[in-house]
Amino acid sequence: EFTEYTNAADMVIKTLTYKRTFEEKMLGNWQTLFVPFEIPVATLTEMGYEVAYYNDFRETLDDDLQPIEGKSVIELIKIKKGTLKAGFPYAIKPMTAESLEMNLELSNVILKSTNATESIECSSAFKRFTFCGTYVKATRVDFTGNEDTPVYSINKDGKMQALSATAKLGAFRVYMTMTNKDGSPYILTPEQAARPISIRVIGEEDENGATIIYDVAEDDL
């Protein structure tokens, strides 16, 4: 069980236990998952979880090129089989009361180094959105180096919410940054930052690993 994680080199662990507690209000809501080891999807499914990867971020702008309230959406693709990669940002949803207490035990695990991580990038006409993970607790400024750059993460209600300048995001969590296409900070007003971003499942991977996009996306979660 980890509270924070620093590791300079890969190592093999004979028996690994990863414990995590989800609050009751998180039942049926997406949360973030970011760990330094691989996890078989079937193991999580049997334990009562759904998992997904971040596919895209979409927002609708008004005539002044400002985001319209309620029209910003994180798109997810459910994963039905295979193995979750180490150091990669995912979303996870506890589906049963028992799954609120995660007690994951794996054998002969390769524990990856802190630097062995990947991020997901997507963009609109004007902005770039990057999904990353953290192994340590940190503030918004720690993630970006700039106090003006907004940082979002999934809150306990299953919505993406902007972090305040001083609030710390916990270890083993996923966050999203926004920048302009030229790399300059994208500035949000306090009112804009306070608006949660919806999360929508738009498809899933089939048994062959091919992505199936739903004709109608699942309701916002």
Image: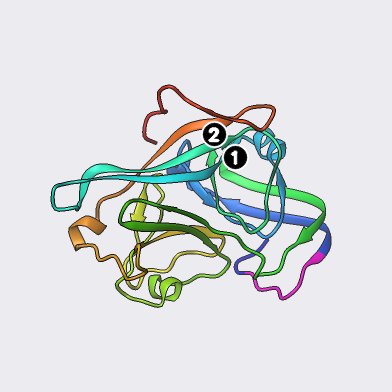
Query: In the picture, residue 72 is in which quadrant?
Result: top left
Residue closest to the eye, 95 or 118: 118
Badge 1 amino acid: Ser
Would you say 74 lies left or right of 49 here? left
* Residue 144 belongs to the span the image colors magenta: no
The residue positioned farthest toward the left in the image shown: 63
Bounds of the magenta segment: 5-11
Query: In the picture, residue 186 is in which quadrant?
Result: bottom left
Q: Is residue 84 above or below residue 42?
A: below
Q: SS at mark 2?
A: loop
What label does residue 99 carry, if any? Answer: 1
Q: SS at mark 1?
A: helix
What label does residue 95 carry, if any? Answer: 2
- Residue 75, percent from left and from top: 43, 40
Question: Which residue does the image show at 67% across and 65% down from the upper left?
Answer: 116
Residue closest to the eye, 66 or 51: 66
Question: Which residue does the image show at 35% across and 62% down from the upper left?
Answer: 181
- Residue 134, percent from left and from top: 54, 65
The residue positioned farthest toward the top in the image shown: 215
Badge 2 amino acid: Met
Would you say 4 lies left or right of 81 here? left
- Residue 178, percent from left and from top: 36, 61
Q: Quadrant of the N terminus?
A: bottom right
Answer whether labels 1 and 2 touch (C-beta < 8 Å). Answer: yes
Question: Which residue does the image show at 59% across and 60% down from the upper left?
Answer: 118
Query: In the picture, residue 152 is in which quadrant?
Result: bottom left
